């Protein structure tokens, strides 16, 4: 078990990661909207709502780590329970938007990629809740981290599009960053790769492999 000092350091690292993901996402989508102004026509109410709840999740992710570092566990637990509503809004709005993009723009690859992100995130979010209830705090933190990293593909894609690079590169970037960041956090925190994290990373990678196979079957 980690010593209290190490627990604080682990939470501070997670807070920095969360703040970094939040800032990166805001800049990525902002740059895409400013440089490719035509996308602004697709900023419908549900798109704006989805953007808001996704940014709210990243803000909550960072804030929860801060609360844990400050030992404000009561508020941490309250917000954790309330996050179920936020996750439901994220998933519902994300699936609706992804379906509409596939139907209206004929970009079913976007639908598949976005659905795969939620197929990764939701089970890991549920696992995170389970680990928290069992007081397996490190596994709880990693479940939330790996699940959140699975949602970052659209942000990576915006940067890649701004740079004029091929869209599929976003999948490679997402997988690489997820594995490297989770393992780096694991090593800094635990000094070894725990079985829970191996399983969660294995699941995340497996979903990507299945997603790529489905994309290949559709478009090759």
Image (spheres, rainbow, N blue to C red):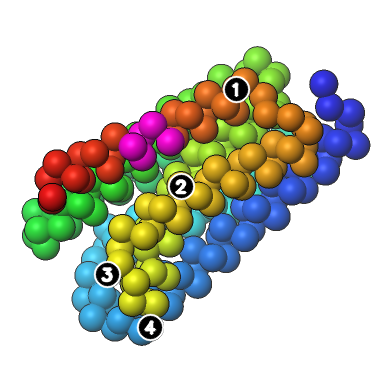
> Going 49% across and 68% down the picture, which residue do you hit?
26
Q: Which residues are magenta?
A: 205-209
Q: Position of residue 131 (x, y in %)?
A: 61, 21
The tag earlier along the polypeptide, 1 or 4, is 4
- The residue pinned by badge 3 equals 43
Q: Secondary structure at mark 4?
A: helix
Q: Position of residue 82 (x, y in %)?
A: 52, 36
Q: Secondary structure at mark 1?
A: helix
Q: Give the residue furthest to the front.
A: 220
* Circle 2 crowding by C-alpha within 10 Å: few under 14, some 14–19, many from 20: some
In contact (CB < 8 Å): disc 1 and disc 4: no
Q: Position of residue 106 (x, y in %)?
A: 9, 58
In front: label 2 or label 3: 2
Q: Is 68 located above or below residue 47 in the figure?
A: above
User: From mark 2 to mark 1, how far is it between C-alphas?
Assistant: 18 Å
Kindly identify which numbered label has been placed on residue 175.
Answer: 2
Q: Position of residue 196 (x, y in %)?
A: 60, 22
The tag earlier along the polypeptide, 4 or 3, is 4
Q: Secondary structure at mark 3?
A: loop
In front: label 1 or label 3: 1
In contact (CB < 8 Å): disc 2 and disc 1: no
């Amino acid at each position: 078990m980690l010593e209290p000092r190490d627990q604080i350091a682990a939470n501070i690292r997670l807070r920095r990661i969360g703040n970094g993901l939040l800032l990166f996402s805001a800049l990525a989508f902002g740059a895409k909207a400013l440089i490719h102004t035509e996308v602004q026509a697709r900023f419908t109410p549900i798109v704006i709502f989805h953007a808001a709840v996704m940014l709210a999740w990243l803000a909550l992710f960072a804030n929860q780590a801060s609360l844990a570092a400050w030992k404000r566990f009561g508020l941490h637990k309250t917000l954790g329970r309330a996050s179920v509503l936020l996750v439901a809004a994220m998933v519902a709005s994300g699936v609706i938007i992804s379906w509409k993009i596939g139907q209206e723009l004929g970009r079913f690859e976007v639908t598949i990629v976005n659905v795969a992100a939620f197929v990764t995130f939701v089970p890991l979010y549920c696992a995170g809740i389970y680990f928290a209830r069992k007081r397996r705090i490190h596994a709880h933190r990693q479940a939330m981290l790996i699940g959140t990293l699975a949602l970052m593909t659209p942000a990576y894609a915006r940067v890649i599009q701004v740079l004029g690079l091929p869209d599929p590169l976003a999948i490679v970037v997402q997988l690489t960053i997820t594995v490297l960041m989770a393992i780096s956090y694991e090593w800094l925190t635990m000094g070894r790769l725990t079985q829970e994290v191996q399983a969660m990373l294995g699941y995340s990678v497996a979903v990507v492999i299945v997603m790529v196979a489905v994309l290949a079957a559709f478009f090759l």
